[in-house]
Image: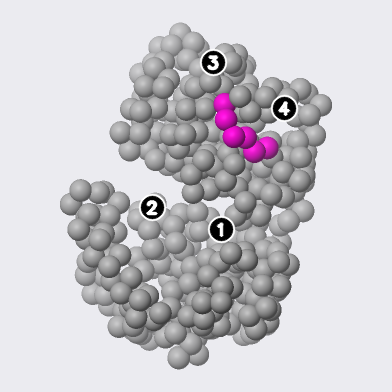
Amino acid sequence: MRLLYALGIRLYGLLLRLLSPFHPKAKAWVDGREGLFQQIKQTVEPGQKHAWFHFASLGEFEQGRAVLEALRQQFPQQKIVITFFSPSGYEIRKNTNLADHVFYLPEDTAANAAAFIRLINPSYAVFTKYEYWNFYFKEMGRQQIPIFMISAIFREGQSFFKPWGGFFRGILKQVTFFFVQNKDSIRLLKDIGIVDAAVAGDTRFDRVLELPKAQRNIPQVASFIGLQEALVVGSSWPQDEQLLVHWAAAHPSWKLLLAPHEIHETHIQAILKLFPQALRFSMFESYAVEQVAQAQVLIIDNIGMLSSLYGYGKIAYIGGGFGAGIHNTLEAATYGMPVIFGPKYYKFQEAKDLIEEGAAFSITDAAALNKVFDALTQEEKLLYASAQAKQYVQRNAGATAIILKYLKGKDLLS
């Protein structure tokens, strides 16, 4: 299995290099790793110890952000290196003030792992939720560098718990301590002989709890909504947008703030075909007052605004539920917004919890969307769902304090 894993890593890198002339994300992935070790040598002070935080992409960065912010505030002398696997995380957060250095993660080979760890010299490493890299973990295990998983969550169907999953269980056993989201994860880890774990919860709760306090004022959005009410759509995909065409036709008195997951021009143009009268945020200043007043849909064709956008709406629709899985529901819930999403939410504990709390609703088609939405517009049901959403976030905060207390107790913070 080790050989298959190593071969798979190399084939994945080769595939992205072949695709890079034709695919912008693949090109960014490849270009970002060209000359990477030389860049690290030139920018990282030799011998300096670092806390190493790795994130798959932007979503995982937001998940671990509360821990980084607490470290910066409470232990400002701590030097921090952040790595990303995906360009969507690196390109947006490469200049974050929460780290001293931000790099792409070199491909997971034995040689890369040894070279990278030698250069950044981590005193400990923090990985988020589900990032498990064999050679990096084995190299840190060999050097006795502690590895911590935060906001980790496990399900029975994962390869770690299959009869043939010995190789993958070996990767898990390199981890020093798991801070997991629920008791089921503790049970599954115990079943394979891993006991260094505790339920801390999800660090995203700590992050999103602060969002309403830091909400940006967006005059264009306020002007667009006026005195009407708005449905905020976060991280939509084409299947979501098809449903929303029917919703918009059935609810002409509501405004629609549409923040698609992909904002490349091809996708924006596809949305404009669905909503021919829609406005684009990037062109807002060019629209006449009458045009803004009459438009029902505003396309948010930028990145970084969504967490503040929720503060302008009454109800949220979260995209991705007809594809690989829904996106972040907590950013909406923290504002006291009921959330609606598609059927593929079972991998997300917070989505299941919000449904149980009466603050979230899963739909399968346009008719179901309209039915749920119409029920939520009844004042009593809206007030109840809103209160449940906000209370759920408040009740589940606190993971960051648990993690920092543990690290401090192990003399890893000073």
Of mark 2 and mark 4, the one earlier in the sequence is 2
Q: Image point 39% across, 17% down: which residue?
A: 276
Residue 273 image offset from top left, x and y in percent: 36, 22
Which tag is nearer the camera, tag 1 or tag 3? 3
At label 4, counting other C-alpha atoms closer than 10 Å, the crowd grade (few under 14, some 14-19, many 20 or more) is: many
- Label 3, on which residue? 249
342 displayed left or right of 298: right
Of mark 3 and mark 2, the one earlier in the sequence is 2
Which tag is nearer the camera, tag 2 or tag 4? 4
At label 1, counting other C-alpha atoms closer than 10 Å, the crowd grade (few under 14, some 14-19, many 20 or more) is: many
Query: Is there any visible trace of residue 221 in the rendered image?
Result: no
- Label 1, on which residue? 63
Q: Give the distance between the C-alpha atoms of the residues marked 2 and 4, in whole angstroms.
A: 34 Å
Kindly check if marks 2 and 4 are in contact, taking CB atoms under 8 A apart as contact: no
The amino acid at mark 4 is Leu
Kindly check if marks 1 and 3 are in contact, taking CB atoms under 8 A apart as contact: no
Residues rendered magenta in the picture: 361-366
Secondary element at tag 3: helix
Q: Give the distance between the C-alpha atoms of the residues marked 3 and 4, in whole angstroms.
A: 17 Å
Residue 363 among magenta residues? yes
Q: Give above or below for 372 relative to 97.
A: above
298 displayed left or right of 403: left
The amino acid at mark 1 is Gln
